[in-house]
Image: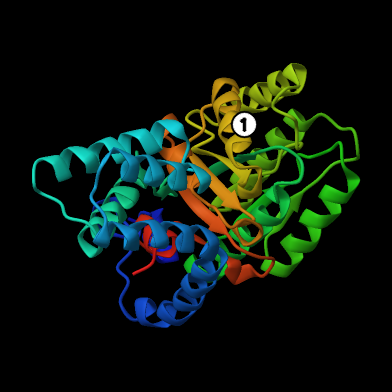
Amino acid sequence: MARTWPELFLTTDAPDGGPPPAGADAEAAAEPRGRFFRRLRDNLRKSREALGAELEASVFQRLDEEAWERLEETLIYADLGAQTTASIVERLEREAGAGELAGGADLTRRLRELLAEAARVGDDHIDLRAQPTVILCVGVNGTGKTTTIGKLAWHLRHELGRSVLVAAGDTFRAAAVEQLAEWAERSGADIVRAAQGSDPGAVAYDAVEAARARGHDVVLVDTAGRLHTQDHLMEELAKVRRVIEKQLPGAPHETLLTIDATTGQNGLRQAQLFREAVEVDGIILTKLDGTAKGGIALAIAQELGVPVKLIGIGEAIEDLRPFDPDDFAQALLGG
């Protein structure tokens, strides 16, 4: 599963189109990744403490129906969702009943494995093998979508050396265009923009055309932050996708949905409705620094079958990282 930036992407640089070999880059990436994990662990402290107390109690108490109910309640509190929680607890209960599982450290270890397993769905890579690769970024207002696009552009430029063009398709918000322009300058990316109120589909079309003409490797298309309850705006989003596909068959090659982790189970509903409007390939889960729970990452993966590909825990560039299920389960559970 993806851990470093090179491991997140499928490129033509590596044998069989897989992630490029890490080499010395892996050692260079270890320190910022370690800092990121420590911050993620701190952010999920409340959930970890609640789960830890329940798991420690299992050392001294029987794993009876009451114990499983308490564990189930604790996992639901962590925002794993009823369906994901029920599946995990039923599996633990079945294994304990068969004599394969004891309480305490054994239960903690197995729960950590199942949490990581629950987060592993689909392909968690971002495929950059098309030339140019078009990535459509969608989400509601306030999720940090435009900022995340800017950070992703920076990482593509500085971690992989890719030539990036960003399309300022959120034409309803002048601030979004200016914000993206600032990030483009900061990351060294090119930008295609239009006047406020312009047709977002036209901006996307022009961006793909410009990328092909100028030889850019990646196009990141911003879209208007829209409520998933606004049908006409969701239809417009589907139209933008069709425009891109008509301009470049097979594109967009990735559609990434930005979800605010602090919205909890409402984020799951957002993901469901966006997936109906456009084919969502992956989730970017932001603002994990603003929630003590974080289990929504597993709920989305399990209930929708859509992998979380990136997570954000702050405002800095290095606060956006590839999602790693093992690290996440460890941060959520401890150990």
| 100 or 181, nearer to the observer | 100
- Under mark 1, the amino acid is Gln
Residue 266 shows up from this direction: yes
Quadrant of the rendering where the C terminus is positioned: bottom left
Residue drawn 59% across and 67% down? 319
Give above or below for 235 relative to 94.
above
| 324 or 149, nearer to the observer | 324
The answer to whether residue 6 is left or right of residue 257 is left
SS of the residue under disc 1:
helix
In the image, farthest residue toward the left: 99
Which quarter of the picture shows residue 233? top right
Picture coordinates of residue 270, whole percent (x, y):
62, 31
The residue that mark 1 highlights is 270
Picture coordinates of residue 271, whole percent (x, y):
57, 32
Chosen colour scheme? rainbow
Residue drawn 32% across and 46% down? 67
Quadrant of the rendering where the N terminus is positioned: bottom left
Picture coordinates of residue 215, whole percent (x, y):
57, 52
Which quarter of the picture shows residue 22? bottom left
Residue drawn 46% across and 74% down? 33
Q: Residues within 10 Å of mark 1 (few under 14, many from 20)?
A: many
Give above or below for 322 relative to 279.
below
Picture coordinates of residue 3, whole percent (x, y):
38, 63
